[in-house]
Amino acid sequence: MAKNHGSSVKDDKQYEGLRKRGMSKERAAKIANAPKSSQRKGGKKGGKKSS
């Protein structure tokens, strides 16, 4: 179970995972606190195929 890292970190589980990969505390906290976006960046454009 993820530790509680205080009110400064919103997603403790994600924060711990990033820290285990060697990321700095500051950068891991910024990523864990970033708003969750339902929109994906990059990749192929969806939609109808033109015939």
Image (tube, rainbow, N blue to C red):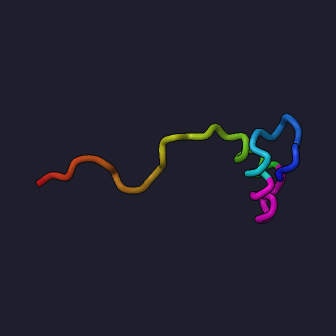
Compared to residue 7, the image places residue 32 above or below, namely: below
**What residue is at 80 percent from the left and 41 percent from the top?**
9
Number of residue marks: 0
Q: Horizontal placement of 31 versus 40: left or right?
A: right
Q: To which quarter of the image does residue 24 belong?
A: bottom right
Residue 29 at x, y percent in the picture: 78, 46
Outermost residue on the bottom side: it is: 21
Q: Is residue 44 above or below residue 33?
A: below
Residue at image coords 80%, 58%: 19
Residue 19: in magenta span: yes
Q: Locate residue 37, reporting x and y percent.
A: 55, 40
Q: Which residues are magenta?
A: 16-25
The percent position of residue 7, horizontal first and vertical second, equals 85, 34
Is residue 37 found left or right of 33 in the rendered image? left
Q: Position of residue 22 (x, y in %)?
A: 80, 64
Most common SS among magenta residues: helix
Q: Nearer the viewer, residue 29 or 48?
A: 48
In this rendering, the answer to whether 7 lies above or below 15 is above
| The C terminus: image quadrant | bottom left
In front of the other: 34 or 5:
5
Left or right relative to 18: residue 51: left
Residue 48 located within the stretch drawn in magenta: no
Q: Residue at x 79, y 46 (%)?
A: 12
In the image as oriented, which residue stretches furthest toward the top? 7
* Residue occupying the far left of the picture: 51
